[in-house]
Image: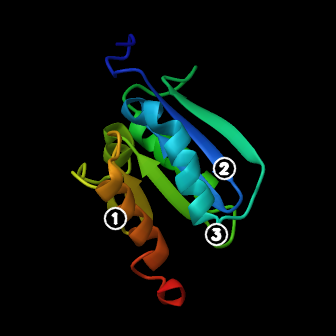
């Protein structure tokens, strides 16, 4: 814990084409798989990957402001590009974005949530089907 009383945390993120990914600490072991998910969300188009990290606490930050600071960071990253697709993984990221932590990969609004556990063949197939179907509000991909 840091002196403000709020637990320190790190969210690793990356941009890949039109995809933004936010990965909590409990999902970091699946980062290579999540890179494949981002590639699929980018319509299997190659792109340069740009890594980003959000660390909390930050120097000079208000106590207990980690959720608001991450929301601002996340909003800036996802509102600065047209047709952005977002994949998130891990309990902390889901909670920081105001969602319950799902037991399986699913869409949380426009966000594709990928469970942080090692996926078996059935889980991968269900996830690839979610990607193929597109977001719930994306009728063009269905």
Q: Which residue is mark 3?
A: 43
**Which residue corresponds to mark 1?**
126
Q: CA distance from mark 1 to mark 2?
A: 24 Å
Spatial CA span between label 3 and label 1: 17 Å
Q: Quadrant of the N terminus?
A: top left
> Circle 2 sits in a helix, a strand or a loop, which is it?
strand
Which tag, 1 or 2, sits closer to the chain's start? Answer: 2
Q: Is residue 18 left or right of residue 110?
A: right
- Circle nearer the N terminus (2, 3): 2
Name above or below for residue 81 compared with residue 54: below
100 sits left or right of 14 in the view:
left
Q: Is residue 134 visible?
A: no
State which quadrant residue 84 falls in.
Answer: bottom right
Does the rendering let one see residue 118? yes
Q: From the top left corner, tell me how far across and down residue 73 is, in percent.
A: 57, 45
What's the residue at 57%, 51% (across, down)? 36
Give residue 25's position: percent from left, percent from top: 42, 29
**Which secondary structure, mark 3?**
loop
Lower position in the chain sequence, tag 3 or tag 1:
3
Q: For the residue carrying disc 2, how many other residues have a C-alpha within 10 Å: few (<14), some (14-19), or many (20+)?
A: many
Q: Does the residue at mark 1 contact the one at mark 2 (Cβ under 8 Å)?
A: no
Above or below residue 58? Residue 22 is: below
Task: Report the side of 36 relative to 135 (left or right).
Answer: right
Q: Nearer the viewer, residue 23 or 115?
A: 115
Residue bearing mark 2: 15
Q: Residue furthest right?
A: 48
Disc 2 versus disc 3: distance between alpha carbons?
14 Å
């Amino acid at each position: 814990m840091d002196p403000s009383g709020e637990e320190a945390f790190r969210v690793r993120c990356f941009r890949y084409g039109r995809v933004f990914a936010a990965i909590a600490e409990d999902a970091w072991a699946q980062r290579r798989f999540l890179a494949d998910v981002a590639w699929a969300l980018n319509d299997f188009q190659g792109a340069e990957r740009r890594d980003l990290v959000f660390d909390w606490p930050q120097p000079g930050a208000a106590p207990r402001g980690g959720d608001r600071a991450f929301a601002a960071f996340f909003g800036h990253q996802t509102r600065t590009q047209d047709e952005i697709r977002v994949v998130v993984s891990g309990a902390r990221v889901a909670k920081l974005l105001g969602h319950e932590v799902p037991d399986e990969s699913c869409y949380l609004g426009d966000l594709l949530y990928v469970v942080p556990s090692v996926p078996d063949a059935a889980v991968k197939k269900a996830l690839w089907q979610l990607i193929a179907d597109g977001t719930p509000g994306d009728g063009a991909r269905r």
